[in-house]
Amino acid sequence: FDHCITLSGLIEEDVEVLQTEIEKFQLTLMIAMSGHEGTCREAEAICRAFLPQYSNDPLTSEWRCNKRSTNDRIRHLQKKPQWSVSVAEDLSKISSDNYPIVLKPEEGGAGSINVKICTNQEMAREYFQEALQNNVIFGSRLSQTFAEKFILGEEYLLDCASYHGYHSVTAVQKYKKFSIKNITRYHTITYVSRTTELFQVLEKFAINVLNSVEMKYGLSHLEVILSEDGPVLVELNPRISGSKGYGNLLTNINTNSNQVASLLRLIQHGVDNIEERIIPSCIYYLQNNGYSYSRVNLDLLAQIKSIRNYSILVPHQAKKHLSSTLNETVALILLANESTVQLQKDYNLLLTYERDGCLFLGD
């Protein structure tokens, strides 16, 4: 970054700090965006202060920044039961035949963080007991917890850029996840071609969702399950795509675009022409299957031919540990290769290294 500023979270003070920085360095502000669920409201407020022409209506922020409010706004698009459960006692309103359910905070919470699939009320009560020990769920108090029906189906992410009410779906990507102790763990993300019927179905759904929550300007990241009855929204986040930017890196490999590039094109030209150049690729979430280590074997990683980029997120682990949340992913690895055969070979190699602990070195 050319400029980094630490903000307080108090909007009036932060606006003054930003204004001083802009004037000092003669900066031109073109986009105000959130990079994290916990700052969505702040990003919208900063956008209103500096870029009112690109600002969403402050009276509708709740529809975009609160997951339960989002679901309420799109009930005409999907049928997914949900319940407000401020405390464990509220679980009594959920009948046993509605399980399994998903418990999550209404605001904050990224990916699988503080999200739990519960197959019965006892498991759901354990969720609240664990949360009480920490007092706060990822910035959201227990009073902001809610439950929704667990839906089966393939899961997808959709990254979008919006300008003046027009929505460009910059990418559809497919998750591959699996569960450990009823906590979802990430495995891979792959790109979905814009020419497929699947892309068109999900694109139409995403545009309907964004219109329903009056998302006029900015970037958004949607997570959707394709059920037997059609697309179902898991959540909408009015922010740039996550996974440390790797979602947009995957889009960059397969197209001439990413979310920011698309938004700038919309602002400058009013249109967004995305061209595809499909390359076999994926994002690989390297997980710890119960090892302790002092460092990751970077030399071994360097020998994998299809690696385009990687980020080590957990460089060491003192005790034997099993990754169970997004925050505990050891590394994000971007694989891409013109040869599908070589990509598959390198993917299988990573699977072996992950299983056998070859990438985890001791002292």
Image (cartoon, rainbow, N blue to C red):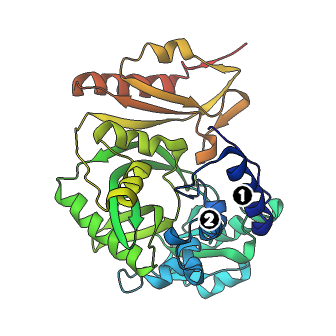
- Circle 2 is placed at which residue position? 50
Q: In the image, residue 314 lies at what x, y percent?
A: 65, 32
Judged from the image, the secondary structure of the residue bearing numbered disc 1 is: helix
Q: Are marks 1 and 2 in contact (CB under 8 Å)?
A: yes
Residue 100 in view: no
Q: Residue at x 41, y 17 (%)?
A: 304
Q: Residue at x 74, y 72 (%)?
A: 142
Quadrant in which the C terminus is drawn: top right
Residue type of the residue flagged with mark 2: Phe
Quadrant in which the N terminus is drawn: top right
Q: Residue 198 appears in which quarter of the rendering?
A: bottom left
Q: Earlier in the sequence, mark 1 or mark 2?
A: 1
Counting labels gives 2
Q: In the image, residue 277 lies at what x, y percent?
A: 22, 38
Disc assigned to residue 143:
none
Residue nearest the viewer, comparing 135 with 242: 242
Residue type of the residue flagged with mark 1: Gln
- Circle 1 is placed at which residue position? 19
Q: Residue at x 71, y 59 (%)?
A: 138
Tell me the distance, in whole angstroms, between the alpha carbons under discs 1 and 2. 9 Å
- In this view, 184 is above or below 330: below
Disc 2: CA contacts within 10 A as few (<14), some (14-19) or many (>=20) = some
Judged from the image, the secondary structure of the residue bearing numbered disc 2 is: helix
